[in-house]
Amino acid sequence: MEYKEIDTIEELIEVAKIYIDSKDELDNIRKAYDYAKEVHKNDIRLSGEEYMHHPLNVAYILTDLYADSDTLCAGLLHDTVHIGKANLNDIEEKFGKDISALVKGVTKLNKLNLFTDSENQINYYKKIIIGLTEDVRIIIIKLAERVQNMRTLYVLPLESRKEKAKETIEILVPIAHRLGLSSIKSELEVNSLKYYKPSAFVSVEELLNNTEEERNNAVKEIQRKISELLVENNIKFEIKGRAKSIYSIYNKLQKGKKFSEIYDIYALRVIVDTESECYQVLGIIHSKFKPKTGRFKDYIANPKTNMYQSLHTTVFGYDGKLYEIQIRTHEMDEIAERGIASHWSYKEKGKKLQNSMEQKLQLFRSIMELNDDKVSAEDFVNSVKDEVLGDSIYVYTPKGDVFELPKGSTPIDFAYKVHTKIGETMVGALVNDTIVPLNSELQDGDIIKINTNKNSTPSKEWLNYAKTSQAKNKIKAFFSKIDKNEAIEKGKELLNKEIRRRKMEMDAFYSKMDYVLKAGKIADENELYLGIGTGKFHPVSVVGLIEKEDLSKEDFILEKIIKNRDNVIDIKNDILVDGIDEIKVSLANCCNPIKGDEIVGYISRGNGIVVHLKDCHNIKDNEDRTINVKWNKDISKKFKCVINITSIKKDNVLLDIISKSSPNEIVINKVNTINSFRDNIYELKIEVYDLDHLNKYILDLKQNSDILNVERVYF
């Protein structure tokens, strides 16, 4: 494999500048380099290189992951204590506690003598590595360091090479896999095989008879030709391609396959909108590329028992090589990726997990939901460590279905893992035919039966017993829904009470409900009741929309404005209203104004003054109901708004978007990703101090050449 390496700090700084725009942070990286260079000035690597070549390129590998500046500094400094004999107190004094803690963590890991003589030892050291890691960045630095070391493993004696390669493949590669670091995982796998089983590596290489780069180029070429064919035929599609790595091919051969039977060395997947288009694409491809006899499978007409659907064909490319092509719809792809036929499940079928990918995806989804709930940083990190990196147990249903759970899970976690409805109606659990309390800790190999009652509901106490964020979120969601339904019922009751108090006819009021909803810009009756039940709307104001008795709210406000036009404003509200010192003021949801925007006040029905952007389309025909308002210059709070970011389909763009938010004091509350054939659109719901901060963030994002467009969204 060919690796790009660098020789100077200037090269590292140039790459870091792509996503780190703080001069102070870049200066700190340079300072860390200078410090490490001085510490290592007398150190030489076994390969004969100056020692600084190693930490410099560890930091360079970390830039591929868009690692933050502290991580890059720690990557440069990671061997200054273990090899260079620097002092941790000195590092803390010069670079601060965070960087010192990262260096200390990596130093601890590097002092471990790892043994891989048995499965128990392998699992033990995985546990030790996670246990020593208070910050997941420590593991990432360790993995980057091992990647760089494996590139020069040839300098070690033969036995040492094999030992290091075995340790890498059995302990560090699974951790990289868990963290989703695919590029690091792939490189570690290939180099581990190269040194642990060199003869096997050479055998596969000879069978392939070309380099990895040549194989990837071959896939790109046929991908380009098929794309041109589909564009010519006006078919909307997505296409993905990959060349199988030497390690993956070795694994297949180890499982008894002959090389001549491995047809997915070069593989493509075409994803279209409809089932009929699947067959249309198949015909188009076969019209230009000769299919290999006996290699066509129609899993659309004849789905597998696990509901997997796709067309499979193997064709000869113009270069004479065989290419496996799968054709499916987006829905089929979703089932394939998330169901029991998933790629992950296929790779880990030795564990005999029928639906491990679905469970793992759900686990990651739950962790992201946990982050959306604004839990503390400590709780979030603990969840990641427990559920992604922690030990797993495998438990069974009475029918023999297997489920993976984090160690420490209870019957509650198991019930929600099987199905949300099972969890919500659970009344008890039997473990190995014995009734157990719901807070009992499950063990590897347990057989669990959940007893349910259709009239039963969860208990809030279960939140104290559940281990997984998935179960906790499902329990919270249940009670959130219950609370919402109660608020709707309460709102309806309060509204009816006010109608009766006014001695109005019930039927007469409800016959004008459409007018009420339209006047209040409310989606439906349930939203109205929910608003009343939660105090957002007052039933007096709602009924007043119909009755229109006495002086209207708008007239009252206008009268007060005229009367107090010359009053001196001396208040601490976010928005200053011309001539009024005490009135309800809110920001419009349609245009989400933020401090610095040109704004205007709109006199609403029952909601005081609603502040809109000056050119908001919702008030352009209502100038007679607008008044002058302005921002209070003394406020310092964050306002909500939405931006859309369009980028090319490339890894790490979202990471760059997120990394640039913090320096601009932007809080990202939610990210919605919209995938298309040509690009990705990220809808960000953010909080920002003012227009200047927002414009600076947008400008920073546009510095990334992979980002095509950034725009603020108004509804």
Image: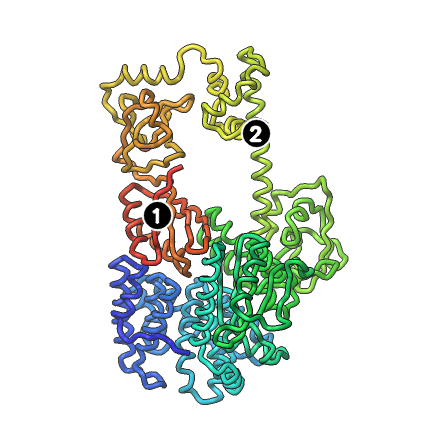
Q: Within 10 angstroms of label 1, few (less than 14), some, or many (20 or more) residues? A: many
Q: Residue furthest right?
A: 433
User: Residue at the location (33% across, 71% down)?
Assistant: 77
Q: Residue furthest front?
A: 287
Name the spot of residue 8 as percent of width and height, x first. 26, 73
Query: In the rendered image, is residue 290 in sight?
Result: yes
User: Residue at the location (45% across, 72% down)?
Assistant: 216
Residue 494 in the image: above or below residue 307:
above
Toward the viewer: 196 or 448?
196
Name the spot of residue 486 as percent of width and height, x first. 59, 31
**659 horizontally vs 487: left or right:** left
The residue labelled by disc 2 is 488
Q: How many marks?
A: 2
Amino acid carrying mark 2 in the image: Ile
Toward the viewer: 183 or 172?
183
Which SS class for mark 1? loop
Residue 342 in the image: above or below residue 527:
below
Name the spot of residue 102 as percent of width and height, x first. 38, 66
Name the spot of residue 351 as percent of width and height, x first. 64, 68
Which SS class for mark 2? helix
Query: In the rendered image, is residue 468 in sight?
Result: no
Amino acid carrying mark 1 in the image: Ile
Q: In terms of image quadrants, where is residue 441?
A: bottom right
**666 horizontally vs 291: left or right:** left
- For the C terminus, give its image quadrant: top left
Which of pointers 2 and 1 lies earlier in the amino acid sequence? 2
Q: In terms of image quadrants, where is residue 592?
A: top left
Q: What distance separates the C-alpha of mark 2 from that of mark 1? A: 34 Å
Residue 24 in the image: above or below residue 542:
below
**Circles 2 and 1 in contact, beta carbons < 8 Å:** no
The residue labelled by disc 1 is 666
**587 horizontally vs 233: left or right:** left
